[in-house]
Amino acid sequence: MKYLFYIGSFLSCFAPAVAQEQVEDDGLGEIVGVFQRLPDTAADDSITVLATGQRGPIDRTGQSISIVTADELAQVQGPDITRVLERLPGVTSARSGPLGSQTSLFVRGANSEQLLVLIDGVRMADQAAPSGGFDLGTLLPAGIGKIELLRGSNSVVWGSDAMGGVLAVESDTRAGPRVNLEYGAHGTLVASAGGRVGDGGSWLALNGGYTRSDGISAKALGSEADPFRQWQGSASGRLALGGDLALVASTRYADSTIDFDGYPAPAYVFADTPEYQTTRQASGRAGLDYAGSTLRLAGGIAVSDTRRAYFDPTYGAAPNFTTAGRSLRADLTGQADLSDGLALDFGADSEWTRYSTTFDAQQNARLTSGHALLSWNRDALSLSGGVRLDDHDRFGSHWTFGANGAVRLGGGWRLRAAWGQGFKAPTLSQLYGYGANPLLRPEESESIDAGIERGDRNAPLHLALTLFRRDSRDLIGYTFPNGYFNTARARAEGIELEGGAHVSDRFTVRAAYSYVEATNRVTGTDLARRPRHAVSLSADWRAPLANLALGIDLRMVSDSFDDPANFQRIDGHALMALRASLPLGDHFELYGRVENVTDARYETAAGYGTYGRSAYAGVRLTW
């Protein structure tokens, strides 16, 4: 089979590192609680919040979790966050045109709307979108300090939307001012700045950025470029109130404008048009944290607001369609150390959502939830199991269960396994909008995965093998003229291989391979835009002379289909990028990259344009 080449490419990267491996313990030392709150100074590249909602070591969970650091974001370079996320196993993406266009992220074959996205702990789903998802096209790397991705269903901790996984983004709170300026192909300008004042118990971090690009045509082979612009800023802080109590708060605002192509009269076929869309996202959270010796509590109120407007200058300056979605959430979570390695994580929350559009009057819904997760941790064994109850004012109550475990074998190796259930509540648009069905039930999923892993992806040597399966049922689909119904069933199963090695002090390699078979169990067809094979390879070398850093990235995906019926094929492709950076003193760095080095012609969504060979250069200043 030709795709055996993918696996061979993966394995060949790590033969030298494994042969020279010196067995060492990559653990974090003795930890009394299962996932006790750790100080902010703990090694953040091996600490996760996604397992239980509390900060804890990644090797104490049986779930599949990957962490991307701020250093890796800077190393990869550029405003396209999918170039970083596709380094992770089980992840593919599709974008409808240039930078800033509608972007979907598929985790182990799950729909993009079945991925819960959190930014600084705030749920970012667009309540006015038909499927209620978050558009990854509006998320740029500027100002991001850390990304975590959990693959698999985990609604016990995270509730609705966590069917395929959870993506958690944290703002950059590193000390010291930072400035970045980049310019390159298609008139692309990226400028960002950030920094933090204060230390220890009280601090304030600010980040801001501006990105613009003349773009390319959203329509493949189109003649009219579709530009993109975004202003964004964020702030987060902590104020120690004395004792073990602190006030915490964060906020984010992003204002984006993207041109797109449409279906103009009289032919009504996809063509260049002057249409454009504006998106304004505002979110924030404020609350109190209590960190006692055996009890930790966090309570607060969070809000997320997304407003979109669609314009067609052909018919005047006023928008021809607008949407507004908002969620308000009050939550209380905690963790109690019980005895002898036993801990209880718990939480309760209420979420009020609302939406309106040009054609739909404002509608509201409320979802109230409570969960408990019992964990037991000993020297070589960690076990967790939990339950959640959600009560929706439209469809009623829904129970969710989950469990996971990890066995540490020594030398940094561990066996892990996880079983979890997920669900997604019907969106307000599906319940009240065009084609609405007030009798809709929540979508449900059940996933299981098991694997063996050494270290984590930020350790000196990381190797991982994972087998997984996820079954989804009562998926909501739309048929004209009948509207929305719970009709579909889907299955995604496959294998993930991942590795990384510091082969020497100056040479590092990473690789990830995924086989994901995602199918519609009613029709037997592949789910749209889900390539079965995906490989990511990268290598970085720092020269002895002047600390010049050179890097290469290779991304390969197999064929997929653009439509549910599998009539329209999307050819597989391979993309290569070359990177370089040169420090000039302690505070100044030059960098640059060339994307799509071979100038490959490809698509991730049929009929939509993609970038050819493109070069960019920039400078970074740090103090």
Image: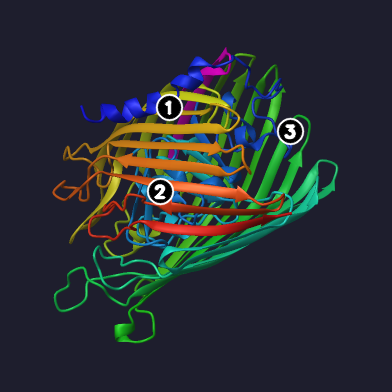
Residue 604 visible in the picture? yes
Give the percent coordinates (x, y) of residue 47: 62, 34
* Position of residue 156 in the picture relative to residue 528 (left or right): right
Residue identifier under label 2: 425
Quadrant housing the N terminus:
top left
Q: How crowded is mark 2: few (under 14 residues within 10 Å), some or many (20 or more)?
A: many
Q: Which amino acid does label 1 sit on?
A: Cys
Between the C-alphas of marks 3 and 1, the distance is 45 Å
Circle 1: is it few (<14), some (14-19), or many (20+) Cα within 10 Å?
many
Mark 3 and mark 1 lie on one chain; the one further toward the N terminus is 1
Label located before the other in sequence (2 or 1): 1
The magenta stretch spans which residues?
A: 398-417
Most common secondary structure along the magenta stretch: strand
Does the magenta portion include 229? no
Residue 222, position in %: x, y?
A: 25, 68
In the picture of the structure, the residue carrying the numbered disc 1 is 13
Compared with 122, 49 (above or below) is: above
Classify residue 89 as left or right of residue 489.
right
